[in-house]
Structure formats: structure tokens, C-alpha cells
Amino acid sequence: MLAGSIPSLPEARVDRNLLLAIVLSVAVLTLWGRFAAPPPEQTPPGGSPQVEQQVPPDRNASLPPESAPHPRGSKEARGAADRAPAIVQPVEEEERVHIRTQLFDAELTTRGGALLRWDLLRYDDPSVPGRPQVDLVTLDPEREVALATPFESLGLGDWSQAPWVLQQPDPLTVVFTREQNGIRVRKTYEFSRDQYLFRLRLEVENGSGQPVAPAFRVGWPAERRESTDYRHFGIGFYTDGSYEYKTLHTSRSFFGMGGGSFKEVLEVPKDIDWAGAVTRYFVAALLPDVPREAAVRVTPIVPGERAQLELAFQKAEVPPGRRVDHEYRVYLGPKEPDRLDAVGAHLEAAIRKGWFPSLTRFFTRLLTATYAVVPNYGVAIILLTIVVRLLMAPLMARQMRSMKRMSTLQPKIKELQARYPDDRQKQSEAMMSVYKEAGVNPLSTMTGCLPMFLQFPVFIGFYYALQGSIQLRQQPFVGWIDDLSAPETLFVLPGLEIPVRLLPLLMGASMFLQQKLSPSAMDQTQARMMMTVMPVMFTLMFYQFASGLVLYWLVSTLLGILQQVYTNRQSS
């Protein structure tokens, strides 16, 4: 029964091995295209999508618009007719105030009672001349402001850039006040010396003789910069139990994958834990005090370059003599896991962890712990690679021995195929007898690529640990490798502007040597093709990977070569 169940296995072994190798190569490229690109837009659990991606950019959608038209003849409509222009220009000199701590240097302005600048003092940008501090407020300060609050629904015009009165009761507290027609609005910023998190409290006090219905809306302009940190830039928010991400701009990879930008208005009508602008290593996030009542709207201004994010609440009527307020927490800082966990509200979801988040977190913490002992992340990667290879050594040794024995049986297999060219039953029975005498499992020909497949979770975990962990940003290894989280460049070919990267080239050469040393059931033509195809494909793919990831694969391949040489000698 067994012999009859696999009659075509021996004669199809060569083609199957070749097919497996080709499928593996294509799978690698496909996996790279999927896990290297930002995650696609998701549909939150519950069946009905919360993100409406094709909403026309009008102000009358689900977000509570302050400028929405009122029924003709209503009191609101008569008041709207007397409103000021959309942008109220300051009528007095603008005042600015600086807040500086051990972590950040911020600048606020009386124009809109808003934020103009937020420099991270512990992080600079080497991709920009002069290596300035990383500034998370990406805007033109002469054109717009961050954390703007229009309050158009008060019927008094747009206050987003109107002049406010400044007060500073203490070094870490800034209060902006604006009063008109008996209505007073207060914006209070409360900062902390040892946190990137601060509080913004908005209060509306109705001192007029009529009820008002303010819509609390806070704006955050997101604009891409010419900086390495902004190669991957988008809008992220946590809603209804899941993290959503929309790419504003993504640089294209070596194969042209991962590029694109959104061009439609995006809205989520409720249940917002946080929303903000997200880069590879930093996040500017707004966290509302009542998530279930918070809505988010993102409007592309210049596709791929600029967008406006607004976090808002539904209008709440305030009778004369009463007051209403809302509070936002604002985090403007690096994606440090411990800090994001301390903030809560699922802000740690801003760190991309890939398909195996637990494995990514494990490698990140393990790398950090190893770095504490050996203060070089390149050395830490090498040490962890050795540990991984040691853990997988028994499986790979067994596979190597099996393939070695299988290759020695090829002359007998070909002889049997020639002896029984038309009788597959006898051919299969004879081959199974040969396999049994040699102690070889014929199905091992189907699993020659199993060790490589088993490395993929490790590979992906390392990828996200190296690509998304702020701890590895700008960490040098040796010589020209000055940033393990980015591709290394030994030199650039003059005239062609093509970077020459040594690690991927060494990796490709080592893969070629490994293919040559590995026993194969293929014929010589197929074997020569695979010795060329696999190393070339991997070299091209890894050419755009972080140098730390290439270092991991290079060291892993070299260790595999040593193990293959040892296995070949033991089997000879």
C-alpha cells in the first residue's frame, strides 16, 4: 500500500525541489512587499467598517462641523451671517513663550493660543544639514499653528489664529484666554519636566444672555519633511479595539514597493482612544478625555505631503452662566515602549511589530539587554544570531544529513528509473527498498527548505526590532556602518549615484558558497541555476534592508556554511 501511494515521488523529486526553491524565492519577495510596507487599512471588529475612505471633503459629514449650515431662518443662521471671515488675523503684536525641560524645547504663541515648535533635545537629525533637533511640529509657523481651536460654532468667527491673551502662572503652565460678547474661552497647557506628555484643557464659559453650543475641535497639521525620519509618515489612530494606519507618504523601495499616499478625506465618527501623526520612530498623538464621544477627521491638503488632522467632540449646549470643558492629553515624543505603555490608551500600538508582535518585543528587549552588557548593537546582533543558530542546529543538522544521504542515492535512483521506465509500481517498490536500506525518508526531499521557512518568524521579528525600535536609531557598528537601522553605504559610484553596500554583497557571496556546499538532488544544470538565482534574488532584496538585518542574515549564513562543512566531513 505504501509503495503504491507515492509512485511518482522519485521521478518528480528534482522538479519538486526546483519548484520549492523558486516558490521560496517568490515568497520571500512577497513577504518583503507585505511586511516592509505599512499595514493596510483595517476594518475594525464588529462587521461594519468605521473608516469611511471615500467621503467628499465637505464640512457636513459625521464629524461635528463648526461651520455647518443651519436651517434657513433659524437663530443660528442669522448669527452666522454676522460672523467674521474664516481666518481672523491678529490685530495686536504676537507674543511667544518658551518652555524648556530636560526632554524638549517648546514654543507657544498667542496667535490661536497654539503650539509652534516642539524640539526633542535628546534626538537630532543627521540627514539634515547642521543636525538640528527633531521637531515634531511639522508646519510653516507663518501659515498655520498646531493644536488650533477654531470655535466657529460660537458664531464669533474662526479663532484658530486670532489673538489670545497670555498668562503664565508658573514655569510649566501656560494659559491663553479669549473673550468676546460675554463668552470666555480658556486654553490651559500643563507640562511636565520628565515627560513628553502634557495636558491641554479647553474651557468655555457662557457669560452672554443666550445659550451657545461650542464644538470642541483641536487641529494638528501633518506635513512631510525631507528627512530620513519622515520616509515613512502617516496618520494613525486607535479605534474600537484596533489600530488603524493611513499612509501619508512612504518612500518607494528598491523594487518600487511600499509607495503611495491617500487622497480622500478619512473619518471615524466615534470611539477614538488616540489619533496623531506617526513616523518610523516618533509620534505626535492627541488623546481625548472621553474616547467614546471623540471623532477624528483627516483631510489631505497636498496628497503625499500635507494633511490636516482634527480630533473633535459633538456640540454641547451651554446655558447662560454655565461652563463646559474638555481635556486632551498630548504626547509628542519618541516611540519608547515604556513611555508609551505608561501613557496608556493603547498608544504602544504606534510601534509597528509585524505579524509576530510578541517575537518582535522579545527581540527588542533581548537586544537592549545584550547591549547593556556589550555596548555595541552590531555585536549584540551577532551574539543573538549565534544563539538562534545553536537552537536550530539539531534540526538543521538532521536535515543536512538526510539531504547528504539522499544525494548519494541518486545514481541508484537513476538506475532504477532506467530499469523500470514503464512500470511505475515496480519502480516505486524498488526505490522504497533502497530508501529503507539507506535509512532515508523520501519525504525529506519535500522539506529541504524547512529550516529556511522556520527562520522567517525570527527574520521578521528581527526586521521589526531593527526597523521600529527607537533604541537602535543611529546606532553604529564598525567603520562606515554608522546606523544599524538603515542600509549601509561603503561608497557611491560616481556618475551613476548607485550606492555600493558591502554587507549585502558579502551575504550574496556567502549564499552562493552555501548553495555550492549543500548536497542537492538536482541535476547539474538545475543546481547551477539555483546557485545563481537564489543569491542574486536575496542580494537585490536585502540591498534596501537595514544593515543590522543584513548583518544578522550574513552571520547566520556563515554559521550555516560552517555547519554544512562539518556535516559533509562527518558523512564522508
Image (cartoon, rainbow, N blue to C red):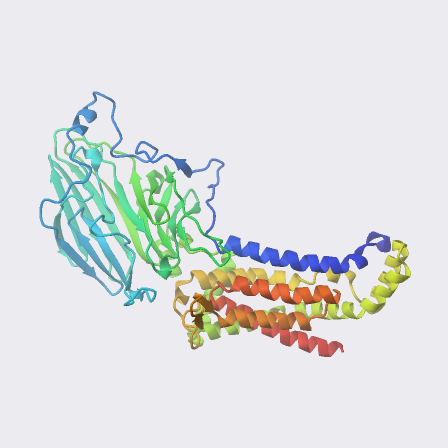
The quarter of the picture where residue 527 lies is bottom right
Location of residue 81 with respect to 232 vertically, above or below:
above
Q: Which of 178 and 318 is in front in this view?
A: 178
Where is residue 482 drawn, in percent x and y?
A: 40, 72
Could you tell me if residue 252 is visible in this image?
yes
Outermost residue, top side: 73
399 sits to left or right of 38: right
**Residue at 53% from the left image edge and 57% from the top image edge:** 32
**Residue at 33% from the left image edge and 51% from the top image edge:** 285
- Quadrant location, the C terminus: bottom right
Location of residue 112 with respect to 207 vertically, above or below:
below
Q: Which of 422 and 108 is in front in this view?
A: 422
Q: Which of 326 and 489 is in front in this view?
A: 489
Where is residue 195 drawn, in percent x and y?
A: 28, 60
Location of residue 385 with respect to 48 vertically, above or below:
below
Total of numbered circles in the picture? 0
528 sits to left or right of 308: right
Could you tell me if residue 355 is visible in this image?
no
Location of residue 96 with respect to 533 vertically, above or below:
above
Where is residue 423 drawn, in percent x and y?
A: 90, 54
Outermost residue, front side: 495
18 sits to left or right of 284: right
Where is residue 64 drawn, in percent x and y?
A: 30, 34
